[in-house]
Amino acid sequence: MQNAPSAVGNSNVVGMKKGELKVFSSGSKATNIGELMNSPMELCSFLRNRIAGSGMKTGEIARIAKLSHSTVSRMLYGDTKDPRLNTVIQLLMALKFKLYVC
């Protein structure tokens, strides 16, 4: 696979391979969402930790992400075994993550 061009404008994306989907929050290293999507329990843990660290409540995140509170809760507690990528992206964007796709 080819590496992403460095001209993307963010040093965090240098070295990403074609087809990768990563997110970044300020001051954190890249997280490969594609890998997390393959492990629902790791994804749940990742999202719970990020929401806890954000200082926002689950309902507030759901409102910003334009998702129902029950959808967010089901994802956070592992009741959704195969979450849609779009739903995960909406949550991450509500948490102010930056999304990079190569």
Image: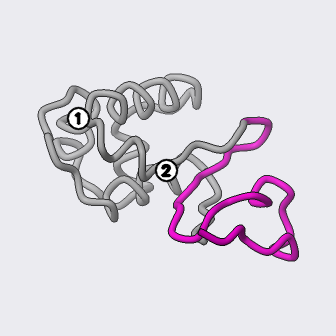
Within the magenta stretch, is there residue 7?
A: yes
* Amino acid, disc 2: Leu
Question: Magenta span covers which residues?
Answer: 1-28
Determine which residue is flagged by label 2: 92
Using residue 39 as the reference point, say whether residue 60 is left or right of it.
right
Q: Where is residue 1 in the image (x, y as percent from the top left)?
A: 59, 68
Q: Are marks 2 and 1 in contact (CB under 8 Å)?
A: no
Q: Name which residue lies at 24% across and 59% down.
A: 84
Q: Is residue 102 above or below residue 26?
A: below
- Of badges 2 and 1, nearer the viewer stands 2
Q: Position of residue 58 (x, y in %)?
A: 36, 34
Element type at mark 2? helix
Q: How many residues crowd mark 1 within 10 Å: few (<14), some (14–19), many (20+)?
A: some
Q: How many residues crowd mark 2 within 10 Å: few (<14), some (14–19), many (20+)?
A: many
Element type at mark 1? helix
Determine which residue is flagged by label 1: 73
Q: Where is residue 14 in the image (x, y as percent from the top left)?
A: 80, 60
Q: Name which residue lies at 27% across and 42% down.
A: 72
Using residue 24 as the reference point, say whether residue 59 is left or right of it.
left
Within the magenta stretch, is there residue 24?
A: yes
- In this view, the residue in front, 59 or 44, is 44
